[in-house]
């Protein structure tokens, strides 16, 4: 799509929004219900596309993509009228007589740029929040998941006219053309490198942006942890979607005294969950493309591999891999892995381990396995991260009741549920000043009596 065509679409969306078509609760509910019904109707098509792009099984596609998206839509449909209400707040005595309230207002025309690793969830979840908040949207799915992008385009074109929601496919040229336009808000999910470019372009127009990025999310396993259960949950979170999950445990940092027991339990769980030969498991996913396959294979040090370490370039699959004796100087620790490679590092002093984590960019997620409440409190108090779990992995993002987002280099802003509605809204502060009384204290001429009254009111 050319830049002139993009500009024409954006102009039509501005006109559609200015005409008030997206503002009423009923119009928003109708749009959300239509999108949810379309998702149900196209569930099989989405599953087939996700299988083609990422090798996902139908169960994983529903559990981690389509089902979660429908859950967000259902939550918004149930709570929308409450979210749209004005919220009365206390009025200072100095402003008597008045009513103060906060009123959510849509930004207007928003741009949603989504990644390839969860192309349904990370496209439609923010779109649901944007629609609920009363915006129009241009949606740009990733070119790396073309089959899913095609089905998403079909679904959204069935549901909405382009002046309301428009899907623009394509690659870098379309991304750059979109970022040259002036939007009222930008929502981006993807890599830190591209996130910097998005924010740079947003700054040209002083456009607010939500960035959902990533980072090296640590998984601390403390010596009081239930090793077998920890291994089971770590294996699930790490190798889901072939490790291509922004909140997957990037590496394990465990007490040195339990390392060998933990590694043995992880190996056992890999076999239990994926079979003796995971590469022969049709429900085990694949790497998105050849470029990422070769990048990941380059991070594996064969001398440190405990299990896995092999790949099939033709099928773009890498076996679930565990590495030990890893240090911070190894290549695998130099970047976010984003694949099925699990390095295991150790510590002898938890405080030193926490300091090591804190010395690096704040991660999108952090996981702690420990039965010791004091240890849990110490880690939560001292570590900075987007979100996480105690004694589990990744499930904190699977709820509309809590915001999901990063901090520092792992992102800014959050969404899901109420946080998502507010991310796509401007919360206006309004004072409704009554006309039946007008306190003279603020008006000149000033004097000692007014000064005393002001000091009473503004203490």
Image: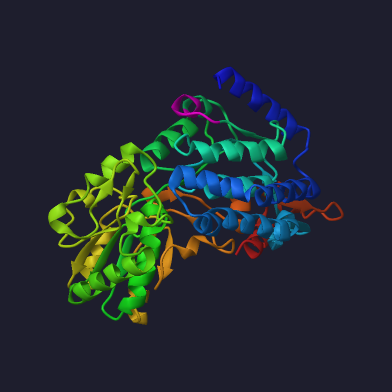
Along the line of sight, the residue nearer the viewer: 122 or 199: 122
Q: Residue at x 41, y 70 (%)?
A: 392
User: On the rendered structure, is 421 left or right of 393?
Assistant: right
- The residue that appears at 18% across and 77% down in the rendered structure is 257
Q: Is residue 276 above or below residue 15?
A: below
**Residue shown at 41% from the left, 65% from the top:** 393
Please give left or right for residue 99 compared with residue 374 in the image: right
> Is 63 situated above or below 348?
above
- Whether residue 319 is visible, yes or no, is yes
Residues drawn in magenta: 169-175
Q: Is residue 433 or residue 349 the one in the foreground?
A: 349
- x and y, in percent, of residue 107 in the image: 64, 40
Residue at the extreme left of the image, as rendered:
303
In which quadrant is the N terminus drawn?
top right
Give the vertical position of 169 relative to 99 (above or below). Answer: above
| In the image, residue 258 above or below residue 54 | below
Q: Position of residue 382 (x, y in %)?
A: 33, 67
Count of residue discs:
0
Colour pattern of the rendering: rainbow
Is-magenta flag for residue 109? no
**Residue found at x 63% / y 59%:** 71
Could you tell me if residue 189 is visible in this image? no
Task: For the C terminus, give its image quadrant.
Answer: bottom right
Q: Give how far across and how far down residue 348 sits, in percent.
A: 17, 73
On the image, the x and y values in percent for residue 235 come to 35, 65
The front one of 93 and 363 is 363
On the image, which quarter does residue 91 sit in?
bottom right
């Amino acid at each position: 799509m050319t830049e002139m065509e993009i500009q024409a679409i954006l102009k039509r969306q501005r006109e559609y929004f200015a005409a008030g078509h997206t503002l009423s609760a009923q119009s928003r509910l109708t749009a959300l219900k239509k999108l949810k019904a379309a998702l149900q109707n196209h569930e099989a098509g989405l599953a087939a596309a996700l299988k083609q792009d990422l090798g996902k099984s139908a169960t994983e596609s529903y559990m981690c993509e389509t089902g979660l998206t429908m859950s967000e839509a259902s939550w918004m449909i149930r709570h929308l009228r409450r979210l749209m209400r004005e919220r009365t707040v206390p009025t200072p005595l100095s402003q008597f007589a008045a009513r103060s309230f906060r009123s959510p207002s849509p930004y207007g025309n928003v741009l949603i740029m989504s990644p390839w690793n969860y192309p349904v969830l990370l496209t439609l979840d923010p779109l649901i929040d944007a629609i609920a908040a009363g915006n129009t949207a241009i949606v740009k799915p990733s070119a790396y998941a073309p089959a899913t992008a095609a089905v998403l385009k079909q679904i959204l074109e069935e549901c909405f006219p382009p002046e309301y929601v428009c899907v623009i496919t394509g690659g870098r040229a379309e991304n750059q053309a979109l970022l040259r336009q002036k939007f009222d808000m930008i929502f981006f999910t993807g890599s830190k490198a591209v996130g910097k470019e998005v924010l740079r372009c947003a700054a040209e127009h002083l456009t607010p942006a939500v960035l959902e990025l990533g980072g090296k999310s640590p998984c601390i396993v403390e010596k009081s942890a239930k090793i077998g259960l920890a291994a089971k949950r770590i294996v699930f979170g790490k190798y889901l979607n072939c490790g291509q999950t922004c909140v997957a445990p990037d590496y394990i940092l465990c007490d040195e005294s339990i390392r060998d027991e933990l590694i043995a339990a992880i190996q056992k769980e890999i076999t239990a969950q994926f079979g003796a030969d995971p590469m022969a498991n049709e429900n085990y996913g694949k790497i998105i493309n050849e470029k990422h396959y070769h990048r990941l294979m380059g991070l594996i040090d064969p001398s440190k591999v405990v299990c896995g370490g092999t790949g099939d370039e033709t099928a773009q699959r890498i076996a679930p891999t565990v590495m030990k004796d890893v240090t911070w100087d190894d290549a695998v620790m130099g970047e976010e892995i984003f694949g099925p490679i699990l390095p295991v590092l150790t510590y002898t002093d938890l405080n030193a381990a926490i300091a090591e984590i804190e010395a690096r960019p704040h991660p999108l997620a952090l996981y702690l396995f420990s039965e010791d409440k004091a240890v849990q409190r110490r880690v939560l108090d001292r570590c900075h991260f987007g979100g996480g779990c105690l004694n589990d992995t990744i499930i904190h993002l699977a709820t509309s009741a809590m915001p999901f987002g990063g901090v520092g280099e792992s992102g800014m802003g959050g969404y899901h549920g109420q946080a998502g509605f507010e991310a796509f809204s401007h919360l206006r502060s309004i004072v409704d000043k009554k006309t039946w009384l007008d306190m003279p204290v603020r008006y000149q001429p000033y004097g000692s009596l007014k000064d005393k009254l002001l000091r009473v009111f503004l203490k």
